[in-house]
Image (cartoon, rainbow, N blue to C red):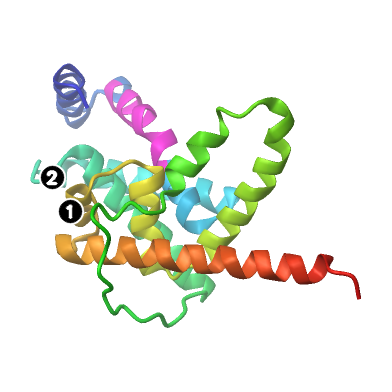
Amino acid sequence: MPPTATADEAGLLRDARAGDRAALGELLRRHERRLFNVALGIVRHHGDAEDVTQDALVKVVQKLDDFRGDAQLTTWMTRITVNQAISLLRKRKTRHAVSLDADRAGANGEAFSVGRTLEQARELPPDHRVQEQEEHARLRDAIARLDESFRVPLVLRDLDGMDYQEIADTLDLPLGTVKSRLFRARLMLREELSRDESRGNEANSPA
């Protein structure tokens, strides 16, 4: 975020804490769409993501006076949203036991980027977009099958654009753990997509 935006937001935060409802509304408006996208990436259901976002914003309002600036406001609000989303996932009882053994990452750990894959599709001509939309649906379904410990950092990195340290701060994890989980998440995602492709080939093969 540019310094001017940061300074402007600091003013909004100060005024919101002083009881300025307009400042509070503007502060929430600036973050609502991004927090919704984070929630949607985690819970994979539009209605649930809306509920998570609204619950998160309510908690932001309730806890605004507790924010001490130890982290960026964006990181703090994202942490609240992630916690709300994870709470919803646990209520769904969809967690799976997944090994957290660390594999060695490549030189930059970016061998497979969900965000880059989705971004490239926006540059395609219209006649190619239907197929790409189908592939993206499979990609999102595969993300939804990842355990939350891998899905959450993947969403924050590839879809929300956070850097490793911001993710570590948001999830209260060591930086090395974040990098390890991201690498594992991409490997697991590629495996899920490969299985989907194999199943599709089997379904389309002649009897």
Which numbered marker is on residue 190?
Answer: none
Q: Residue at position x 30%, y 28% from top?
A: 27
Badge 1 vs badge 2, beta-carbon distance below 8 Å: yes
Q: Which residues are magenta?
A: 23-35
Q: Please name the amino acid that badge 2 sits on.
A: Ala
Residue 205 placement, left or right of 35: right
Q: Residue at position x 17%, y 24% from top?
A: 6
Q: Residue at position x 21%, y 41% from top?
A: 64
Q: Secondary structure at mark 2?
A: loop
> Is residue 28 a member of the stretch shown in magenta?
yes
What secondary structure prevails in the magenta region? helix
Q: Nearer the viewer, residue 153 or 52?
A: 153
The furthest residue to the right? 207
Q: Alpha-carbon distance for marks 1 and 2?
A: 8 Å
The residue tagged 1 is: 169
Kindly report which numbered mark, 1 or 2, lies closer to the viewer in this rendering: 1
Q: Residue at position x 14%, y 47% from top?
A: 66
Q: Secondary structure at mark 1?
A: helix
Q: Please name the amino acid that badge 1 sits on.
A: Asp
Q: Nearer the viewer, residue 148 or 180?
A: 180
Q: Residues within 10 Å of mark 1 (few under 14, many from 20)?
A: some
Sequence-wise, the earlier of marks 1 and 2 is 2
The residue tagged 2 is: 71
